[in-house]
Image (tube, rainbow, N blue to C red):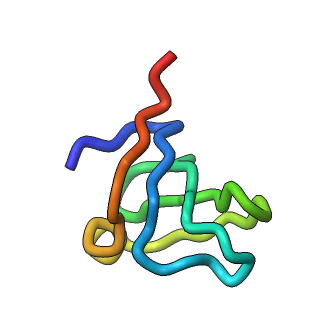
Amino acid sequence: MQLKLGDIVVMKKAHPCGSKEFEITRLGVDYKLRCTGCGREVMIPRIKADKSIKAVKSDEK
């Protein structure tokens, strides 16, 4: 899966605030994701993130 900084990803499970969309703010062994609903940032391992991402909305302008 090709991801880059600034991409918006849709996860299978919703964040406790109700939003399923997250913005990628860091790539590496862990992904740092910012919830687009409440702004909270979470870090999850790449393997777990790859399994839980349902769709990618590229941030191409």
Extreme residue toward the right, this view: 38
Residue 47: which quarter of the image? bottom left
Question: In x, y percent, where is residue 9?
Answer: 45, 53
**Left or right, 38 with reference to 23:** right
> Residue at 67% across / 64% down in the picture?
41
Q: Nearer the viewer, residue 19 or 32?
A: 19
User: How far across and down, in percent of the image, does residue 12 sit?
Assistant: 40, 75
Vertical side of 52 occupied by 16: above or below: below
Task: Point out residue 48 in the picture as x, y percentages from the top left corner.
Answer: 32, 77
Q: Quadrant of residue 57?
A: top left
In this image, 1 relative to 23: left or right?
left
Q: Residue 18's spot in the image, x, y percent?
A: 68, 76
Residue located farthest toward the left when viewing the structure as drawn: 1
Up the image or down, 13 lies above or below 1; here it is below
Residue at the spot 26% in from the left edge and 73% down from the top edge: 51
Residue 9 is left or right of residue 25, and the answer is left
**How many numbered callouts?**
0
Identify which residue is drawn at 56% across, 47% down.
25
Q: Residue at left 56%, top 50%? A: 23
Q: Is residue 29 left or right of residue 41?
A: left
Camera-nearest residue between 29 and 33: 33
Residue sitting nearer the eye, 24 or 58:
58
